[in-house]
Amino acid sequence: MNTNVMHIYPKSKHTLGDTEFYMMWDGLHNMLAVSGSLALQFEGDDVSFDGKEVRLCPLTVENSKMIRQLFDFTNPKSHKGHNISFGLGDRLGLASVGHIQLVRELDVFPVLAQQSMRELNLTNRTYDDVLASAVWAVFREGYTKGYGADGDHLKTQDEVIYALECGYSMITLDCSEHIRNDITDASKSKVDALYKGLPTELTYSLESRYLNKSYQIDNDVTIEFDETDFKRTVLVYYDAIIHAAGIYDELIKGKSIDYEISIDETLSVTSPQSHFFVANELITRGVEFSSLAPRFIGQFQKGIDYIGDISDFKNDFIVHAKIAKKLGYRLSIHSGSDKFSVFPIIHEETDGKYHIKTAGTNWLEAVRVIAEQSPELYREIHRFALEHLVEAKVYYQITEDVSKIADIEKVSDKDLSKYLDQDDARQVLHVTYGLLLTATKDDGTSLFRDRIYDVLTKHESDYIEALKKHIGKHLTALGISLV
Ligand code: ZN
């Protein structure tokens, strides 16, 4: 070990009985150092250091599980009781230190680990590994205020079980596969016929609750269902409600888990009636959920600001916010990165109680550091992303215009980071992360992955600062003071 380049993270020093713990940079890697009787519980190599026996332990999943057993503050927790929670997906497993440094003094509950199955697959990671990255950051920063881990956009019972077994504290149930997309535009006769096919006990009880009834949300908002609206709403959402209630009863009930209902990944915008119907039916069935993600009007595309009419958004959002307030949960805003023009509305109309998810732009900030610190690598990434855009767009809906992206052969090294400020380039780099991180050379070694990690490890402080600035801009736009 080269003690000249060694660095101990001061906030990572912890003591338990006769055992001392701290995290350090050994010149090549971040490591956990343990000295005392508990060292035997960890995998690592024993060295003598300043005349003391120390076990130097790699930051593995197994070692992170031992840390979680010994230090409760490193376990993910429910965010119940917190007004603002913030999803901070970290595709590389390197962003949490920056995120913690930003929020540690604020009343913002960070959900440091947050990945969907799609993101796990696209990055070749596991839920254990994603959580371990957050655990090490929390330990290193001595961050004891609590953080969450979100099994995001989970669709099946097996996926929920997987996330829960790994210790995740939040489950976002994606109901999209149980939401019918073929009803909204179906003819009245088709709707009538399909509705007739439902069990009569069910339609009877639903009709008694909704048909020709009105629900007063507040002085200005009343939810009403006429017959056609009602039948369509039942046909579109009924399976999703049964699915969400079933998962709750089997896997969530009685546990300290934040349960989020996601109905945002559908073809059509969620109407206030639909939102109310889904939420009210879940509550009627005894389902306790902490947040619900409707699909809002306009477009929430990846990595860029809101697309649509801001006053339309405001009118629509106000109603959703009132329904959530009345029924007692918070709205969740997905694809929340960079939606600066609507953040003030979100904060204001929810009385400062909401969940927002960001993820991909934390990756874009990593790409920004690469553009600044390793121009050649950035150029390769840029060309690869453009060449493989069609493959990436199978997973993500974006409306980029590549003709607006400046020709990289004509851009000087010092201007490369400007691509990260241009919407079309941002979207291209945003959606191609999976292909970039898993691309291999002919000999099977990584094309970019290892070099990306090398640059970011070497320039960690730049990445931390970039993240603080980027997410800090979100918080400021929401109206949260950073000091
Ligand atoms: Zn979503």
Image (cartoon, rainbow, N blue to C red):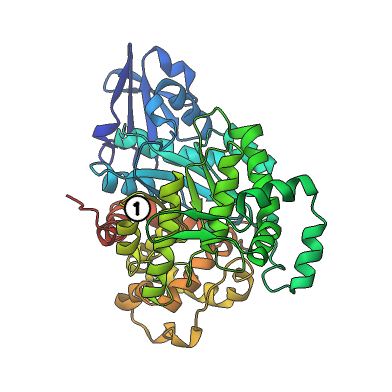
Nearer-the-camera pick, 227 or 77? 227
| Residue 302 against residue 217 in the figure, above or below | below
How many numbered markers are drawn?
1
Q: Residue 375, relative to residue 83: is it above or below?
A: below
* Front residue of this view, candidates 303 and 458: 303
- Identify the residue at image location x=40%, y=58%: 362
* Relative image position of residue 301 (x, y in whole percent): 48, 69
Residue type pointed to by label 1: Lys
Residue 89 can be seen, yes or no:
no
Which residue is pictured at 27% across the width and 55% down the height?
A: 465
Out of 403 and 483, give the one closest to the viewer.
Answer: 483
* Residue sitting farthest toward the left: 483
Residue 1 horizontal/vertical position (percent): 35, 35
The x, y position of residue 51, in whole percent, is: 28, 18
Residue 419 % position (x, y)? 38, 76
Q: Mark 1 points at which residue?
A: 458
- Crowding near pointer 1: few (<14 within 10 Å), some, many (20+)? some
Left of 234 or right of it: where is 335?
Answer: left
Work out whether residue 474 or residue 126 is closer to the camera in this orientation and state it: 474
Position of residue 1 relative to residue 416, above or below, is: above
Element type at mark 1: helix
Q: In this view, does 92 lie to the left or right of 392?
A: left
**Residue 13 seen from this side:** yes
Cβ(mark 1) to ligand 1 < 8 Å? no
The answer to which image quadrant residue 228 occupies is: bottom right
174 sits to left or right of 350: right
